[in-house]
Image: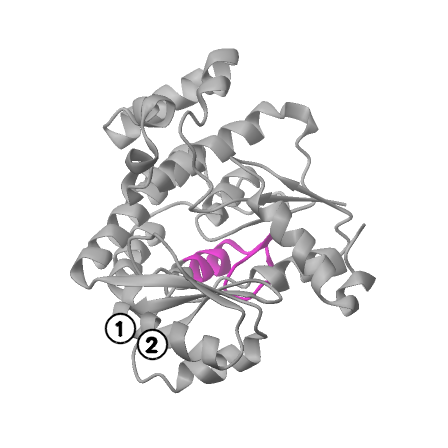
Amino acid sequence: MKAYVFPGQGAQFPGMGKDLYERSDVARRMFEKANDILEFEITDIMFEGSEEDLRQTRVTQPAIFLHSVILSRLLGDDFKPDMVAGHSLGEFSALVANKTLSFEDGLWLVAKRADAMQKACEKQPSTMAAILGMDDETAEKVLKGIGEIVVPANYNSPGQLVISGSIKGVEAACERLVQAGAKRAIPLKVGGAFHSPLMEPARVELAEAINETLFKTPICPVYQNVNAQPVSNPDVIKSNLIAQLTSPVRWAQTVINMAADGATTFIEVGPGTVLQGLIKKVKNSVNAYSAVLPE
């Protein structure tokens, strides 16, 4: 069985998508439609912009979504997913790929999400950090004793946890986690505390947009970030997608569950190979996972 996975924020790079635009009429039409929907020339920024230009949340999120969705369309008849999943933003790409959302509605929601998240970031300065070399349970215990807003945001793989919260909270947590045995605590260059309670204003705003949008029954299940479980019910997909902004991304468990449910091949669709790296780490980090994860 084939599992198609879609990357999230951080996978962008200068020039992304230009090769697709130049070699495919289908891609060209989709990019130009995106310019109209977004009401700015995102193609100019994607193809010619700098890393700094691409780092703007209002650009990054639709850019990665476009690259991923267009690439899946160009696979044509070869694109036959048995299951899909996306990391954070990538869940929207996955929902277009499995036909829960139309391309137009998916892009509109991503643009709304990016705008809402940017406003939440501006309302309260916040940040994130990657914690390496510590088990999740120990990290969670340390975070509970910080006394500031700081929570697990991405369970990426065993020994790789991203935390999210107030600047003071994340700084204190990094210090405490290293003292408690983490190998490294790496501050991330992000605009705010994604997947934390500080995204509540964005969650409320996005919920309104999601509830106005048509979600269809998908052609295959999507394994959603909030619970790592396969979902095909459009109403449940909506509810989980709304909760995603303030909930952690359970990526390691998603990979384990997809493999346990029969995935023998994981295919990453989008810019870069970040998810392939995480999938490999999930497989290699814990011997018990080898029973369910393919070679």
Along the line of sight, which residue is nearer the eye, 234 or 260? 260
Task: Name the residue located 49 percent from the left edge and 18 percent from the top edge.
Answer: 19
- Highlighted magenta segment, given as a residue range: 222-241
In the picture, measured across the screen, residue 71 lies left or right of residue 43, that is right
Crowding near the residue tagged with mark 1, few <14, some 14–19, many ≥20 C-alpha atoms within 10 Å: some
Helix, strand, or loop for circle 1? helix
Task: Name the residue located 30 percent from the left edge and 54 percent from the top edge.
Answer: 206
In the rendered image of this protein, does residue 294 appear above or below residue 4?
Answer: below
In the rendered image of this protein, does residue 136 appear above or below residue 80?
Answer: below
Q: Residue 223 sits in which quadrant?
A: bottom right
Along the line of sight, which residue is nearer the eye, 191 or 59? 191
For disc 2, the marked residue is 172
In the picture, measured across the screen, residue 184 lies left or right of residue 279, that is left
Q: Amino acid at mark 2?
A: Ala
In the rendered image of this protein, does residue 20 appear above or below residue 173?
Answer: above
Q: How is the image coloured?
A: one colour
Residue 20 placement (x, y as % from top left) = 50, 20
Residue 53 placement (x, y as % from top left) = 28, 34
Helix, strand, or loop for circle 2? helix
Instruction: Find the distance from the CA under tag 1 to the CA under tag 2.
Output: 6 Å
Looking at the image, can residue 135 be seen? yes
Q: Are marks 1 and 2 in contact (CB under 8 Å)?
A: yes
For disc 1, the marked residue is 168
Looking at the image, can residue 221 be seen? no
